[in-house]
Image: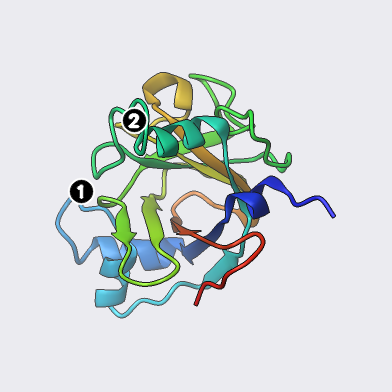
């Protein structure tokens, strides 16, 4: 039996989307500072639960440029800039095309005028956890009511520095891509996206607790 790339790599990624409708978002906006981004933490503090939450498990592939960045941090050229609060985005798009190692952006990303992709700056620095097994890397972004209003079928991360419809405009290293059918985001809704990458799953021997 030939193992797939994701299995050989020993990396599993879960993609979670929490969805808040227009009424929830409007009620929350009335209770925060003008211009403040509505995140899961704010909705939770206001006692608002999402109307839907969906997680797809093990649905992601680290692409070639992602592995160049990962392995360059061990031996080689270190990724520049590194992911951080000001250098990291989650992108979503409309294509259900299978993830492939050679991909350099979302398949729905058609360039600077794209209407079928959107990259949102992360809500804070990616969280790294190495104190237990498996270690994790977590990206989170909140997509406000005026953006990414299309059918979400794919996701990925890059090291871009500003919100944009395309990796090509204010992009950076494209790290990973996955396929996840999340439904259609409507104008006025706020959807939050969380990627949890888990490292160290053995392909032949050993265990991960």
Look at mark 1 in the image and give the residue it sits on: 35
Q: Which residue is found at the position 39% from the left and 56% from the top?
A: 137
Q: Residue furthest right?
A: 1
| Numbered mark located on residue 178 in the image | none
Q: Is residue 9 above or below residue 114?
A: below
Q: Earlier in the sequence, mark 1 or mark 2?
A: 1
Q: Quadrant of residue 107?
A: top right
Between 187 and 105, the one lying in front of the other is 105
Q: Which quarter of the image is occupied by the N terminus? A: bottom right
| Picture layout, residue 17 above or below residue 94 | below
Closer to us: 173 or 42: 173
* Disc 1 to disc 2, C-alpha distance: 32 Å
Residue 169 percent coordinates (x, y): 41, 20
Q: Is residue 7 left or right of residue 114?
A: right
Residue for badge 2: 79
Please name the residue shown 14% across and 57% down the image: 33
Q: What secondary structure is marked by label 1?
A: loop
Q: Is residue 177 left or right of residue 84?
A: right
Residue at disc 2, secondary structure: loop
Residue 70 spot, x, y in % from top left: 42, 39
Look at 16% across and 52% down and name the residue there: 34
Question: Residue at coordinates 28% horizontally, 68% vertically from top-left?
Answer: 41
Q: Residues within 10 Å of mark 2 (few under 14, many from 20)?
A: some
Residue 156 sits above or below residue 132 on the image: above
Tell me: 84 left or right of 148: left
């Amino acid at each position: 039996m030939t193992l797939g790339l994701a299995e050989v790599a020993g990396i599993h990624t879960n993609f979670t989307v929490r969805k808040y409708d227009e009424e929830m978002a409007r009620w929350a906006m009335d209770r925060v500072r003008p211009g403040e981004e509505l995140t899961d933490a704010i909705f939770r503090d206001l006692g608002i639960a999402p109307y839907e939450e969906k997680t797809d498990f093990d649905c992601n592939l680290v692409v070639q440029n992602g592995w160049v960045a990962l392995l360059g941090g061990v031996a080689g050229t270190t990724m520049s800039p590194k992911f951080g609060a000001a250098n990291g985005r989650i992108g979503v798009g409309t294509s259900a095309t299978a993830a492939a190692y050679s991909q350099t952006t979302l398949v729905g990303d058609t360039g600077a005028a794209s209407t079928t992709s959107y990259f949102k700056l992360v809500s804070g620095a990616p969280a790294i956890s190495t104190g237990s097994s498996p270690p994790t890397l977590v990206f989170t972004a909140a997509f406000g009511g005026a953006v990414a209003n299309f059918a979400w079928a794919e996701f990925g991360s890059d090291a871009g520095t500003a919100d944009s419809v395309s990796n090509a405009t204010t992009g950076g290293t494209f790290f990973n891509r996955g396929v996840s059918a999340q439904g259609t985001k409507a104008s006025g809704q706020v959807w939050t996206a969380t990627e949890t990458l888990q490292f160290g799953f053995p392909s032949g021997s050993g265990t991960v607790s």
